[in-house]
Amino acid sequence: MDSAINHLHGRLESIFEPDRNAKQSFMIRKHSATLHGHRTSFSLEDEFWDELKTIAASRSMPLAALISEIDDRRPADSNLSSALRLHVLAWTKAGGRPVAAA
C-alpha cells in the first residue's frame, strides 16, 4: 500500500510542481461514462484520468463506480470534471485513503 501511495504522490507532485525547465504538454481529453443510466461526458487531463484509475484499482472497484460515487457526492452547482480533479487532490492529501463525503 505504501508503494502505491508513494507512486500516486510522486505522480501528483510532478503535476503540481513540474520541472520549470521541462516543456509541459497537458492533454485534456473527453471521456464518457454512464451514470445512473444516463450517458455523460467530461474533460480531464491524462494525469488526472490515470490517477482516477489508480484510485479505483486501489479500492478494488470499477472506474465507473468511482466516477458515479464522486458524481453523487458533488455539490449541485459544480461540474463533474472539477469534482473528479478535486477528488484526486483530496485522495492524495489524505495519503491515499478514501475521502470522506463532502
Image (spheres, helix red, strand yellow):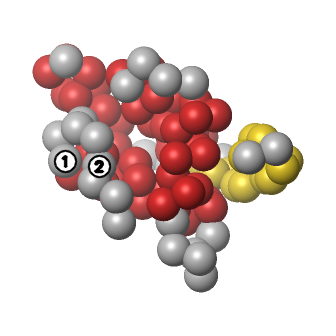
Instruction: Determine whether, in the image, residue 7 is placed left or right of residue 49.
Output: left
Q: Where, by quadrant of the figure, is residue 8 drawn?
A: top left
Q: Residues within 10 Å of mark 1 (few under 14, many from 20)?
A: few
Residue drawn at point x = 49 percent, y = 23 percent: 61
Residue 102 point in image, percent of width and height:
35, 66
For mark 2, give the secondary structure: loop
Residue 98 point in image, percent of width and height:
28, 41
From the image, tell me which residue sits under label 2. 99
Of label 2 and label 1, which has the lower sequence position? 1
From the image, tell me which residue sits under label 1. 94
Instruction: Determine whether, in the image, residue 31 is placed left or right of residue 10.
Output: right
Residue 83 point in image, percent of width and height:
51, 62
The image shows residue 24, relative to residue 75, as above or below, that is above
Callouts 2 and 1 close, C-beta under 8 Å = yes
For mark 1, give the secondary structure: loop
Instruction: Determine whether, in the image, residue 86 is placed left or right of residue 7.
Output: right
Task: Decide if residue 30 is in sight here.
Answer: no
Task: Decide if residue 72 is in sight here.
Answer: yes
The image shows residue 43, relative to residue 14, as above or below, that is below
**Label of residue 38 in the image:** none
Residue 65 point in image, percent of width and height:
58, 35
The furthest residue to the bottom: 77
The amino acid beneath tag 2 is: Val
Q: In the rendered picture of this protein, how many numbered marks are placed on residues?
A: 2
Distance from Cα at disc 2 to Cα at disc 1: 7 Å
Residue drawn at point x = 59 percent, y = 81 percent: 77
Of residues 47 and 94, the one drawn nearer to the viewer in this rendering: 94
The image shows residue 31, relative to residue 61, as above or below, that is below
Of residues 38 and 80, the one drawn nearer to the viewer in this rendering: 38
Residue drawn at point x = 52 percent, y = 38 percent: 66
